[in-house]
Amino acid sequence: MKWNGHAALVLVLTSIPLGPTSAQASSKAVGCWRMSFSPWSPSPGGDSVLYQPLPDTVRLSVKRFDADYLQATRRPNVVPQMLRQSIDSLRVFWRPLSRDSIEVWLPTWWSTGVRVNLRLVGDTLEGRGEIYVDYTPHETPYANVRAVRCGGA
């Protein structure tokens, strides 16, 4: 069977809506967060230009991005220099994973970006970010991530 665009659309439209446990995480996580990333380990080397600058702030929304994810914004929203001829802004989206965990996607380009899994601990989000790419022969770089609520969130 050949893949076509219609098959992908059907999969998106039949996804499972947020359950009560996930809805609880989304209500607690909505708002403005100041983020900090530890240095990457191992270093992505020259590829690090694809992930800079990392956001220092994300605002998580309850508005739908698609059937599975919710909208968010990032600051700064600066496209890496080497990609500026192709794109002019960066998307960000997120979803609750469980009662106290969320996943935030910070795509840079088609199949490249940073995926962050965070756990809500009081008024702080803590977890790990990993670089994702369509192919790499190297170990996946990761960073520890911490986020605290923005003032007046």
Image: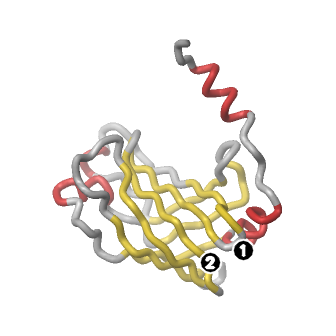
Residue 120: mark in rendering: 2
Label 1 residue SS: helix
Which of the two marks, 2 or 1, is nearer to us in this view? 2
Label 2 residue SS: strand
> Residue drawn 26% across and 46% down?
136
**Horizontally, is 40 left or right of 30 in the view?**
left
| Residue 82 position within the rendered picture, expressed as x and y whole percent measured from the top left | 24, 47
Q: Are the residues at dot 2 and dot 1 in contact (C-beta closer than 8 Å)?
A: yes
Q: Residue furthest left?
A: 46
Quarter of the image for the N terminus: give it: top right
In which quadrant of the rendered view does residue 11 lie? top right
Q: Residue furthest front?
A: 1
> Residue drawn 37% across and 47% down?
112
Q: Which residue is mark 1?
A: 28
User: How many residues crowd mark 1 within 10 Å: few (<14), some (14–19), many (20+)?
Assistant: some
Quarter of the image for the C terminus: give it: bottom right
> Residue drawn 67% across and 73% down?
100
Q: Amino acid at mark 1?
A: Lys
6 or 107: nearer the viewer? 6
User: How many residues crowd mark 2 within 10 Å: few (<14), some (14–19), many (20+)?
Assistant: some
In which quadrant of the rendered view does residue 123 lie? bottom right
